[in-house]
Amino acid sequence: MTATANGPKHTPLFPLPLVLFPNGELRLRIFERRYLDMVRDCSRSGEPFGVLAVVRENDHSNVCAIGTLAKIVDFDTLDDGLLGITCIGGSRFHVRHTHARDSGLMLGEIELQASGERLPVAPEYAALQQLVGNMIDTLGGRHASADKAQRDDSDWVANRIAEFFPFQIQEQQWLLEQNEPTLKLQQLVEWLPRFRSDEPSD
C-alpha cells in the first residue's frame, strides 16, 4: 500500500479473470511494465496488492468491488524468461475509490472486510468437509499442512471447494462476497451435483 501526504493509503489493484480466496494460492506470469513495477514496489515494502475479479456479462467486462489481498511469497524466472510470482490470499476488501497512475496501474482506497469468528462445520455439511480432505490428500499442495482447526472451519472449507471445482467466475465471486459461511456451504451443496462425474481441478 502507498500513502499520500496526510492522506489515506492506496493499494495497487490487479484486475484478473479469476477469484482469489483467503488462504488460496495464486501463480501469475508478469510481463506488463505497470505490473512489473507493482511487484517491485510490493516486494520492497512487504505490502500486498489487491486482486479483483473481472466478470464478463452481456458483452461488457466489469471489475468487481470486493476482492482479496495477495501477498507475494515467491519469485521464479519462467521458461520464456518472464517473471513468475506466487502469492497467498489474505483479507477480503471492498474498494471505496480508485484512480490510475500514468502507467495505467490502478490504485484503490480500500476497506478491509471483517472475517468474523470461526464457525465449526455443522454435521449436515460433514460430507463437504470430507470432500475437502480427500481432495487435499489427492492433490497435495500447500493445504496438505493445514491443521485440524482449519479443516473444521466452515469458511475455510467453503473456500477450498470453491477453488478446487470449476465454478463459473460469477459463482466464485458470489461465494467470496458472502459473510455467512453456512450460507456458502448450503449453496455449494446445491451446486456440486453437476460435477459428480468431474475430477477436481488443481
Image: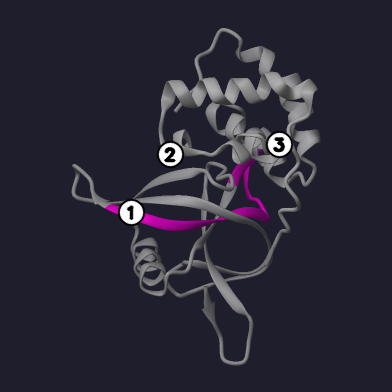
Distance of mark 2 from mark 3, alpha carbons? 19 Å
Chain part drawn in magenta: 54-75
- Give SS at disc 3: helix
Q: Residue type at mark 3: give it.
A: Ser
Residue 111 placed where, x, y %?
69, 66
Which residue is labeled 2 in the image? 142
Which residue is labeled 1 in the image? 74
Query: In the rendered structure, are the residues bearing label 2 and label 1 in contact, judged by CB atoms less than 8 Å apart?
Result: no
First of labels 1, 3 by sequence position:
1
Residue 61 placed where, x, y %?
61, 45
Residue 165 placed where, x, y %?
56, 25
- Give SS at disc 2: helix
Distance of mark 2 from mark 1, alpha carbons? 13 Å
- Give SS at disc 1: strand
Answer few, some or many: residues within 10 Å of disc 2's Cα (few below 14, many 20 plus, some between 14 and 19).
few
Image vertical order of residue 125 relative to residue 51, above or below? above
Which residue is labeled 3 in the image? 154
Q: Residue type at mark 2: give it.
A: Arg
First of labels 2, 1 by sequence position:
1
